[in-house]
Amino acid sequence: MAGKILANLIIMGSGVLARAFVQAYRQAIANASKTGVAQEAMQNAVRKTSKAMTEHEARQILGVGEQASWEEILQKYDTLFERNAKAGTFYLQSKVHRAKECLEAAQQTKACNGG
């Protein structure tokens, strides 16, 4: 009999604790939304994941030097992109693509600045 009472108390107590936990979690989310903490955390997460590739890193990925022509860059890009499409990984293929985009943006900036 005492075991049954103890089991009921444990079950009831865990139910009360679970409801209290859920209520506290909801209140924490509501407080974070009011103060902008949640939005700030999301913005920080986006900033960390959207680190821009440097021109130097892009040149290393494509294996081209500082003096490489745009045609040479495109040729390296095509070769590496196709190679990774067949036997590589999507990650490497996306890195090659981002490297080309980075160098393309750098090329356009130089053209706009007269360099």
Image: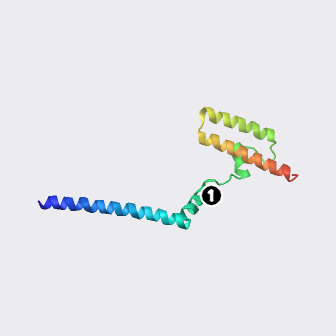
Q: Nearer the viewer, residue 44 or 56?
A: 44
Q: Nearer the viewer, residue 85 or 57?
A: 85
Quadrant for the N terminus, please. Answer: bottom left
Is residue 75 toward the left or the right of residue 11 in the image? Answer: right
Percent x, y of residue 98: 68, 45
Residue at horizontal 54%, vertical 65%? 37
Give the residue pinned by disc 1: 47
Toward the top, the furthest residue is 86
Residue 8 location, quadrant: bottom left
Is residue 16 toward the left or the right of residue 76 in the image? Answer: left
Residue at horizontal 81%, vertical 48%? 108
Percent x, y of residue 35: 54, 67
Residue 69 location, quadrant: top right
**Crowding at label 1, few (<14), some or many (≥20) Cα neighbours within 10 Å?**
few
Residue 59 showing in the rendered view: no
Residue at horizontal 80%, vertical 43%? 68
Q: Is residue 90 above or below residue 31?
A: above
Percent x, y of residue 104: 76, 45
Q: Amino acid at mark 1?
A: Arg
Dot 1: what SS? helix
Is residue 40 toward the left or the right of residue 103 in the image? Answer: left
Percent x, y of residue 113: 86, 53
Residue at horizontal 16%, vertical 61%? 5
